[in-house]
Image (spheres, helix red, strand yellow):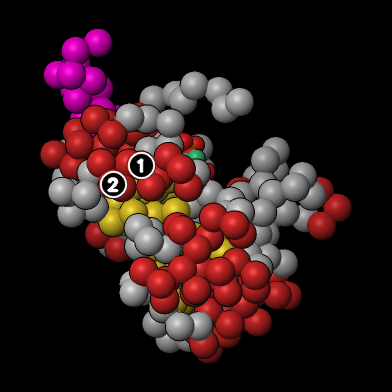
Amino acid sequence: MTAADRRAEIAAGLDSVRRRIDVAARAAGRDPAAVALVVVTKTFPATDIRALHELGVRDVGENRHQEASAKAAELADLPLTWHFVGHLQSNKAGAVSAYADLVHSLDSGRLVRRLSAGAHVAARRVGCLIQVDLDEPDNHKGRSGAAVADVERLADLVGQSDGLVLRGVMGVAPLGTPAAPAFATLAAVAEQVALAHPGATIVSAGMSGDLEDAIAAGATHVRVGRAVLGSRPPLR
Ligand SMILES: *Cc1c(COP(=O)(O)O)cnc(C)c1O
């Protein structure tokens, strides 16, 4: 495929997702401009991110530290906001704070401490979302996220941590069950967090398959990969 063909393909994907966001927001009585699109570019090359930038995208998401840091370095000339959406290993958390603007996946005190130490070393302020585990306890398939009961404690810890700014919460709907109840749980948790931390207003929820449910439940950020960029090669 030529670069122009790929760009046209990305433009079409982007158009269709922007339309879906628009329709879902209006259906929920919300302003479409209140829903930010984070394009999840994991496994796709930096050239795709350049094309996205030309098409007006400013928020990109990655889920692996090595890949994310390489792309952020290669694209340092672009005014992009880098979202880290994947599971964070604690030995990588410090390094992520060197380039990530918003980390969506904080789910333990240990990660908060590592990220804060990294932000201090990098002399940066890193936005943080607490990832909430939305799986039923008896349906747990090893997804990440803090238990609902632990979110407040983690939010307070982020709020007190050097170099970190608590911005809200994030969730991934469990596989194989309807997404709406999970997103309703996330919305309720988000409301509690925002009561104690008035600046923490982000609700990151919704992917290619369930962004409409997420927007109906109040998502302020949707994280969309395949519906914009096409299918990814299977992960190893
Ligand atoms: C990959 C990923 C997405 C995007 O998923 P798509 O199905 O490609 O839209 C969103 N959130 C997280 C945490 C991801 O890892």
Q: Residue at x 82, y 57 (%)?
A: 137
Q: Secondary structure at mark 2?
A: helix
Does the beta carbon of the residue at mark 2 sit less than 8 Å from ligand 1? Answer: no
Q: Position of residue 142 (x, y in %)?
A: 75, 47
Question: Which mark is on residue 70?
Answer: 1
Front one among 28 and 195: 195
Give the residue type at disc 2. Ala
Residue 82: quadrant of the picture: bottom left
Q: Position of residue 122 (x, y in %)?
A: 36, 69
Distance in Å between CA atoms under marks 1 and 2: 5 Å
Q: Main secondary structure of the magenta part?
A: helix
Q: Residue at x 50, y 74 (%)?
A: 117
Q: Position of residue 214 (x, y in %)?
A: 49, 53
Q: Residue at x 86, y 53 (%)?
A: 138
Q: Quadrant of the C terminus?
A: top right
Residue located farthest toward the front when viewing the structure as drawn: 121
Q: Which residues are magenta?
A: 1-16
Taking the image as shown, residue 109 lies to the left or right of residue 96, namely right
Q: Residue at x 45, y 83 (%)?
A: 162
Whether residue 8 appears in magenta in the rendering, the answer is yes
Give the residue type at disc 1. Ala
Front one among 16 and 200: 200
